[in-house]
Amino acid sequence: MALAEPQARRMEAVRRFVRDHADERLDRARLAAVAGFSVPHFHRLWRAHTGENVAAYLRRVRLRRAALKLRMGAVDITEVALCAGYETHAAFTRAFKQQYALSPSQFRDLDCWMATQLLHERG
């Protein structure tokens, strides 16, 4: 379903908000308020606009940010995991492997070209 232009602009505003505030606690109610819609209406429009639910989008944005931190030389994977909103190294590693098919340390060890390709394909 294609959204009307005003609705699409609001969804893009929410995407920018998520990228700018990914380190904060974000839930559907807060994002619906950013868009100016009720939670159920926001959820329907978000899904139509992005093809995924809000939780999946947030997870993807946070994991991509974590992957970039690893590429920039972050040494402590647990610290990266905590910044990405994961309570444990193990939970972060599971989610990271699911997203990128590599552990965080394997990803960190990739050459620049391979890491960039993986981020474009899966991030």
Image: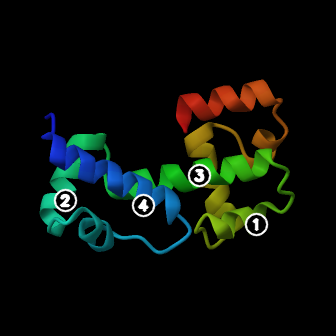
Frontmost of labels 2 and 3 is 2
Amino acid type assigned to the residue bearing label 1 in the image:
Thr
Frontmost of labels 1 and 4 is 4
Residue that mark 4 sits on = 17
Report, in whole angstroms, how far the alpha carbon at label 3 lies from the one at label 4. Answer: 16 Å
Residue that mark 3 sits on = 63
Frontmost of labels 2 and 4 is 4
Foreground residue, 59 or 26? 26
- At a point 41% along the width and 51% down the height, the residue shown is 57
Circle 1 sits in a helix, a strand or a loop, which is it?
helix
Instruction: Look at the picture and state if 122 lies above or below 25.
Output: above
Circle 4 sits in a helix, a strand or a loop, which is it?
helix
Residue that mark 1 sits on = 78
Discs 3, 4 touching: Cβ within 8 Å? no
Q: Earlier in the sequence, mark 2 or mark 4?
A: 4
Q: Earlier in the sequence, mark 1 or mark 4?
A: 4
Foreground residue, 104 or 21? 21
| Residue 80, x across and y down, in percent | 72, 62
